[in-house]
Image (cartoon, rainbow, N blue to C red):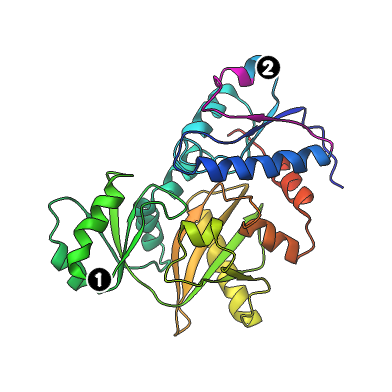
Amino acid sequence: MITHNFGKVAVLLGGRSAEREVSLQSGQAVLEALRRSGVDAHPFDPAERALEDLQHQGFKNAFIALHGRFGEDGTIQGILEWMRLPYTGSGVMASALAMDKWRTKLIWQAVGIRSPRYAVLQADSDFDEVADTLGLPLIVKPAREGSTIGLSKVYAKQDLVEAYRLAAQHDALVLAEEFIAGKELTVAIVGETALPVVRIEIAGELYDYQAKYLSDETRYFCPSGLADELETAIKVQALQAYKVLGCEGWGRVDLILNATGQCYFLEANTSPGMTSHSLVPMAAKAVGISFEDLVMNILALAHVE
C-alpha cells in the first residue's frame, strides 16, 4: 500500500464537456479507490460548484478526472495553477496541445513521428479534392473533442459534407484524415514509464463511443500478442510522442499499426478514462499494479508548475 499525506483531495469529475457522463464514471471510480486507500477524498463537480470552493474548503490536492473541454484542454489546469493547488496530469500547455489534434500533428510531423495524412476542413473546402487526395474511406472529426464524439468514417464523396457538418457542431476546427487499416493499439504512461501495449479488437467498423464505453463486444488484449521487440519499439515511440508535447504525470497515446509494421500515431490523451472499460487500469493490472495503487501513483505525481 502506498502511503502519503495528501491532505484533503478534490476529485474533479463531471464538468461541462460532451464527455460529462464518462467523466462522472471515471471520477466515481477514482474517488472510491482513493477512499479505500485511506485518502480524505471528496467529489467536486465544476459544473455544479464554484471553483473558489477549492480554496475556501481547504483542499490540498486535485485529482483531475475530467474529460474533454474545460477539463482536459488546459482550462482547469490554468485555474489550479493560479490557485497554486497541485493537480494530476499534464500542465497548461501540454493539455491544450494534446486536446488539439491538428496542432499535435504539426508537432509530431516536425520531429518525425508518423501520423495519418490530413486536411483541415472548412465549409467552403473542395470536398471532392480532399477525398481524392486522402483517399476513401477517410475519417472526419472535430479537432478538439475526445471519445470520438462527432467522428465519422466516410466511404463516399457525397457523404463528406454531412460528416463535416456533424463534426462542425462540436468544433469550428474540423479534420479529414486518411483511414489507416491495421491494429488499434494504445500505450498508457505513468510517470516516466510506458505500460504494456493494449491491443483493441472491435466488432464493428469503428472504435467509436459505442465501442469504447457501451459495447461488450469490443475485445482488449494485454499482453498485446505483439513480438517483444516490436512492443518495446512502440513503447519508445509512444513515450517520445507524449514527451514532445510536454505531457507529464500520466496519459495515454493511441496509434494504429498497419500491415507493413508502421505505426501511425493518432492522439495523446492527458486525462484518460478510468471506467470499467478503460485502458490505463487494464495496462497497469497486466504488470501487477492494482487500481488503488494506480490512482495513488498518479496522485503522488500531482504538481504545480
Residue 41 lies in the magenta stretch = yes
Residue 82 lies in the magenta stretch = no
Which residue: 22% across, 62% down? Answer: 160
Quadrant in which residue 33 is drawn: top right
Query: Alpha-carbon neighbours of circle 1 within 10 Å: few (<14), some, or many (≥20)?
Result: some
- Seen in the picture, residue 145 relative to 178 is either above or below; the reply is above
User: Reading the chain from its start, which is encountered first: label 1 or label 2?
Assistant: 2
Most foreground residue, 78 or 68 = 68
Q: Evaluate if marks 1 and 2 touch, with contact meaning CB atoms under 8 Å apart.
A: no
- Seen in the picture, residue 25 relative to 50 is either above or below; the reply is below
Most foreground residue, 80 or 40 = 40
Under mark 1, the amino acid is: Leu
Quadrant in which residue 126 is drawn: bottom left
Instruction: Tell which residue pokes out farthest to the top in this image.
Output: 56
> Label 1: which residue?
134
Mark 1 element type: helix
Whether residue 46 sits left or right of residue 205 in the image: it is: right
> Residue 234: x and y, percent?
56, 71
> Residue 281: x and y, percent?
68, 56
Under mark 2, the amino acid is: Gln
> Residue 145: x and y, percent?
41, 48
Instruction: Tell which residue pokes out farthest to the bottom in this image.
Output: 260
Numbered circle sitting on residue 57: 2
Q: Is residue 229 visible?
A: yes
| Image: magenta residue range | 38-54
